[in-house]
Amino acid sequence: MLEAPNVGSFAEGYVSVALPVGVTGYGVFRQSVPGLPDQEAVVPLAYPNVTALSMVYDDINAITAIAVVNPSNVATSITITAEDVNGNVIATSANPLVLQPGTKQIGLLRSILPGLNGIVGNRGIAKFTIPTGGIVVLGLRAKGVALTSIPTINGRTLFDFTGEQFF
């Protein structure tokens, strides 16, 4: 177990670990606000050799934030496309998000890149694609002081077991 104590100045970053085949794990993010109970979100460890990830977002009832990491040793360009609940493309990043090796970008999904403000007041699927290399995306959903993680899946489409899109 690795744990960063909740003391001192706020710091951000990410952790990269090499695990043996078959070993999995998760991370726990804790938000501490004086006078309120701590809020936690659990996220599974992710494999960094993925070129397409999808996740649901909800910008009607909550705020969706993301952290995008380039864990590879080459620069990459990430395109983000958002669809509504009917599968209509409602927002596309005007320019790709360019990340140098070992760097990250964090922010609200709706404003991390120009062109994504079309998700405001909508919910649906956000798709992250790169031509080569690998990316890791963490989604966080916040409503008031409540915080939870949004899992991403490898691929471009989210389907349930009946073949219908889900949200």
Image: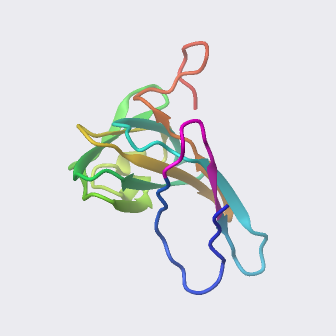
Q: From the top left corner, tell me how far across and down residue 125 is, in percent.
A: 46, 36
Q: Is residue 117 visible?
A: yes
| Front residue of 72 and 95 | 72
Q: From the top left corner, tell me how far across and down residue 21 is, in percent.
A: 54, 37
Q: Residue furthest bottom?
A: 8
Q: Is residue 23 magenta?
A: yes
Examine the rendered structure and indicate whether residue 162 appears above or below residue 5: above
- Residue shown at the point (77%, 74%) measured from the top left: 36
Q: Is residue 115 magenta?
A: no
Q: From the top left corner, tell me how far across and down residue 37 is, in percent.
A: 79, 70
| Front residue of 53 and 4 | 4
Q: Quadrant of the N terminus?
A: bottom right
Which color scheme did the rendering employ for the protein? rainbow
Residue 112 shown left or right of residue 24 in the figure? left
Q: Which residues are magenta?
A: 18-29
- Residue shown at the point (45%, 34%) measured from the top left: 84
Q: Quadrant of the C terminus?
A: top right
Q: How many marks?
A: 0
Q: Residue furthest front?
A: 20
- Residue shown at the point (27%, 40%) measured from the top left: 130
Residue 109 shown left or right of residue 145 in the figure? left
Prevalent SS, magenta region: loop
Examine the rendered structure and indicate whether residue 56 appears above or below residue 69: above
| Front residue of 118 and 7 | 7
Instruction: Give residue 31's quadrant in the image.
Output: bottom right
Q: Is residue 120 visible?
A: no
Examine the rendered structure and indicate whether residue 63 appears above or below residue 123: below
Residue 83 shown left or right of residue 93 in the figure? right
Q: From the top left corner, tell me how far across and down residue 148 is, in percent.
A: 64, 53
Instruction: Give residue 50's quadrant in the image.
Output: top left
